[in-house]
Image: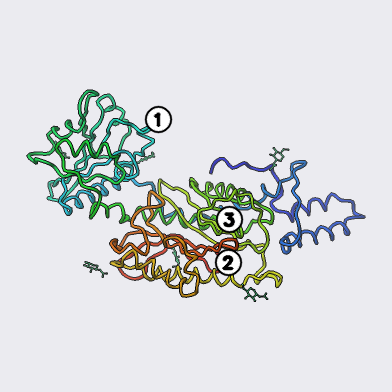
Amino acid sequence: MKEHILPPPAPANAQEQQKSRCRMASWYSIRTLCAILIINVFIWFHGSAFVPRTHHNSSGKQTDLEKFEKCSIDTFVGTGMEFLKTAERPPLEEYVLRRNNLAKALVADSVDAFVVEPGYTFSYYANVTQPQWEVWEPEERPFLMVIRPTKNDDGEIVANTTFLVPSFEEVRARLLKMPFEEEIEAVPWEEHWNPYVTLYTSGIWGDKLSPVLMVDEEIRDFIQRGLDNHGFTVVGLSGEVEAVRQIKTERELGILSAVNTGTVEAIRAMRTCLYPGVTENEVAAVLDNTMRAAGFEPFFDIVEFGKSAALPHGGHDGERKLAPGDFILIDVGSHLYGYSSDVCRTFYPSFFPNPPPPEYNLTEHLAVWTLVLDAQAASVKAMVPNATAASVDIAARSIISAAGYGQYFTHRLGHSIGIKAHESPYLNKGNFEAKLRPGMVFTSEPGVYVLGKFGVRHEDILVVREDGEAENLSGGFAVSPWEP
Ligand SMILES: *[C@@H]1O[C@H](CO)[C@@H](O)[C@H](O)[C@H]1NC(C)=O
Ligand SMILES: *[C@@H]1O[C@H](CO)[C@@H](O)[C@H](O)[C@H]1NC(C)=O
Ligand SMILES: *[C@@H]1O[C@H](CO)[C@@H](O)[C@H](O)[C@H]1NC(C)=O
Ligand SMILES: *[C@@H]1O[C@H](CO)[C@@H](O)[C@H](O)[C@H]1NC(C)=O
Ligand SMILES: *[C@@H]1O[C@H](CO)[C@@H](O)[C@H](O)[C@H]1NC(C)=O
Ligand SMILES: *[C@@H]1O[C@H](CO)[C@@H](O)[C@H](O)[C@H]1NC(C)=O
């Protein structure tokens, strides 16, 4: 819970505010005055869609925006935030498990070692992010983690990790306190040496002539060429090694469930506090502060009203004001213990009545909302072990196409998610190579975007399970535009 701008102390809600003012009024005028105020309160809660509201900010009164933020945070915190229970910061054993899984994958892929430089995969295996190591700018001196399979005393395949590190940086590398049970093993190289020759002649390769190294997808080209030109055989990321980060451990699932369910809950809480005239940028800021109340770190928001939502990744200036009848599309992500949420809801604010008043013709909007939900449900059914990534996209796409909206579903169905919001495998209609495996986590986010009119997207997070249907990690699907 940090850094919300707290408004000055004020009665808990508008009704109490009005009541206390009633008490101060003289007895003569009290009945008339209170009657007027009660009518006001009634309009405020039941008919505000159709009554323009003024902003006040005098004599310590909260502005609509301040009330909105307080209401959103209070509603969110008031849920009890039970979703946090499944999350714990990954302990040391988790990193040992990941590296041992990698060691087994290296054996399965007949590769001698995996090589990675600071980045997402490095943080996955050793809890150090690129900016933690490369504090000022990307570093030209190679600092490489080299993970080799070996057998422990019980004959089990486990990881043996070595770091190729600039000599003068060895102490700094140790100060990072990476999650290892023993002291880390360093192969230091002096500034005037060739680091790749240093690694090749380090003695860790036994009698192998040209050790086969699988490099991570994020490794830079000059490092890859350096290794390839100095004794090693370099191959790109693939096979079982690539699958290690794709298949989530139970601890990872616990965090992903917490952060994604919490993000949906934050949208739901915020929704009940919306008022006409609030801007997209204001909603994004309030939603971010709402998520911060759960200890989340927001990292992206797409908030779009009405026809702005026809651009799936945003692009307008965020200054559109909320008007009755507008769909609100919110696609948002936060981090918890380094894991991402990425969910989307399309809905009406609670001040907009259900069913809509007759002067709003929302027939098409509502039909498309349901169509996109049906497409999402079909994709969830298709998320079974051994299915191709393409087949899951096609399951959703065929429903939208059959209804005549195929050309308006302009992006892929989804992607995997973990420490990055977008991870492989990708669910697009051309990806017949990637097969789903139990423990893989995907977004399902079908959408329909009609330029100049509206946009609808629903996005939830699912884990593929061995038996039965994929399980949601975002707390349950949307039910209607009034129950997102
Ligand atoms: C309301 O007024 C106070 C002081 O007069 C000011 O500090 C605050 O920024 C104002 N809030 C808004 C949202 O304008
Ligand atoms: C991983 O790093 C974070 C901070 O960067 C730290 O709080 C946490 O304790 C580390 N985890 C382990 C297992 O060392
Ligand atoms: C890891 O490998 C190095 C070099 O082969 C060896 O000296 C060291 O004992 C190994 N460590 C473990 C924990 O197996
Ligand atoms: C509402 O709009 C739909 C198309 O979106 C149209 O078919 C229908 O006739 C309209 N209804 C009314 C009452 O205008
Ligand atoms: C998936 O395929 C693998 C091998 O191709 C097979 O062993 C496994 O039983 C299959 N799983 C399911 C659920 O069909
Ligand atoms: C989604 O997951 C939550 C918690 O894991 C569960 O309570 C809920 O029933 C699930 N909803 C659906 C629609 O599967």
User: SS class of the residue under badge 3?
Assistant: strand
Task: Please report the residue visible at 77 percent of the width from the left and 41 percent of the height from the top.
Answer: 59
User: SS class of the residue under badge 2?
Assistant: loop
Specify whether 112 is left or right of 132.
left
Q: In this orientation, which residue lies closer to the viewer: 138 or 149?
A: 138
Quadrant of residue 379 within the rendered picture? bottom left
The Cα atoms of the two marked residues, 2 and 1, are separated by: 46 Å
Badge 3 is on which residue?
Answer: 304
Q: Nearer the viewer, mark 2 or mark 1?
A: 1
Look at label 2 and name its amino acid: Pro
The Cα atoms of the two marked residues, 3 and 2, are separated by: 15 Å
Callout 2–callout 1 Cβ contact below 8 Å: no
Residue 46, position in %: x, y? 72, 64
Q: In this orientation, which residue lies closer to the viewer: 345 or 79?
A: 345
Look at label 1 and name its amino acid: Trp
Badge 2 is on which residue?
Answer: 481
